[in-house]
């Protein structure tokens, strides 16, 4: 059989590969930053709801007014915490972000959702809820931290990772920072956070309504 240059090249390199960068990020620290930014918002949310519990309804005050006031204060705190993180990372760490809009929105949404979750626990279950919130924060760190790859975790724990809110906040912010994932991953993460936010918003409102009715009945 005759062998020409083309045949020799084909046999020596049967597979052609194209190599391209999916992200310009080269710092391992910057690659880990999205998780710690999101996790910091969870800590801030838990601390806010433990240190500043919701006030009791004043005489004649409606559930909507009480709940709305608390919702505004929590949202304001979450936005301010996000702004502080963003400004600090930019000024002190020269943090590079590929898509700032997606990055900022992902952090704000994560902060608000964490506020709703931890507030529901603290408001509904009192001191027990505060303890649950602290345990919830610790569990989120163990399950989702990049310091411990899920392959190193027992199967029981690694199977819980898709059910952790921090996981989706991290995925959304990481996509915006590195711009190396697909839009579908970002959109799915944002959608899940929105659904979680709506669920805990409804649950918290139900808890407010129940407690307010109980307080009115006691007053009578």
Image: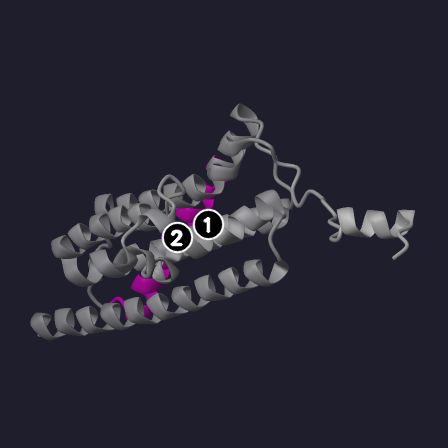
Kindly tell me whether residue 25 is visible in this rendering: yes
Q: Looking at the picture, how far across and down is residue 208, in whole percent?
A: 25, 68
Tell which of 47 and 172 is nearer to you. Answer: 172
Tell which of 210 and 61 is nearer to you. Answer: 210
Residue 88 lies, with reference to residue 53, above or below; the image says: above
**Circle 2 SS class:** helix
Quadrant in which residue 215 is drawn = bottom left
- Residue at left 91%, top 50%? 4
Kindly tell me whether residue 108 is visible in this rendering: no
- Residue at left 88%, top 52%? 3
- Position of residue 89 in the picture relative to residue 70 (left or right): right
Which stretch is magenta?
A: 61-84
Numbered label attached to residue 166: 2
Tell which of 52 and 98 is nearer to you. Answer: 98
Residue 191 lies, with reference to residue 107, above or below; the image says: below
User: Magenta stretch containing residue 77, yes or no?
Assistant: yes
- Residue at left 39%, top 65%? 196
- Position of residue 48 in the picture relative to residue 193 (left or right): left
Quadrant in which residue 119 is drawn = bottom left
Q: Looking at the picture, how far across and down is residue 25, in whole percent?
A: 61, 36
Tell which of 94 and 23 is nearer to you. Answer: 23
For the residues bearing labels 1 and 2, Cβ distance under 8 angstroms: yes
Q: Which SS does the magenta portion mostly show? A: helix
- Position of residue 201 in the picture relative to residue 136 (left or right): right
- Residue at left 26%, top 61%? 120
Numbered label attached to residue 170: 1
**Mark 2 closeness class: few <14, some 14–19, many ≥20 residues within 10 Å:** many
User: Magenta stretch containing residue 171, yes or no?
Assistant: no
């Amino acid at each position: 059989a005759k062998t020409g240059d083309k045949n020799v090249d084909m046999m020596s390199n049967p597979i052609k590969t194209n190599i391209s960068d999916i992200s310009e990020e080269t710092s391992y620290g910057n690659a880990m930053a999205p998780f710690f930014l999101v996790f910091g918002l969870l800590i801030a949310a838990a601390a806010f709801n433990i240190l500043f519990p919701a006030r009791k309804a004043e005489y004649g005050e409606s559930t909507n007014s009480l709940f709305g006031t608390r919702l505004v204060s929590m949202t304001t705190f979450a936005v301010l915490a996000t702004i502080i993180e963003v400004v600090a990372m930019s000024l002190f760490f020269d943090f590079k972000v590929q898509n700032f809009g997606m990055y900022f929105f992902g952090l704000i949404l994560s902060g608000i959702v964490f506020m709703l979750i931890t507030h529901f626990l603290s408001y509904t279950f009192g001191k027990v809820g505060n303890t649950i919130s602290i345990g919830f924060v610790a569990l989120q760190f163990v399950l989702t931290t990049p310091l411990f790859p899920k392959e190193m975790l027992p199967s029981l724990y690694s199977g819980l990772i898709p059910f952790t809110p921090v996981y989706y906040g991290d995925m959304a912010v990481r996509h915006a920072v590195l711009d190396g994932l697909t839009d579908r991953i970002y959109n799915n993460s944002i959608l899940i956070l929105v659904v979680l936010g709506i669920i805990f918003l409804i649950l918290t409102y139900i808890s407010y309504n129940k407690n307010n009715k109980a307080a009115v009945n006691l007053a009578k």
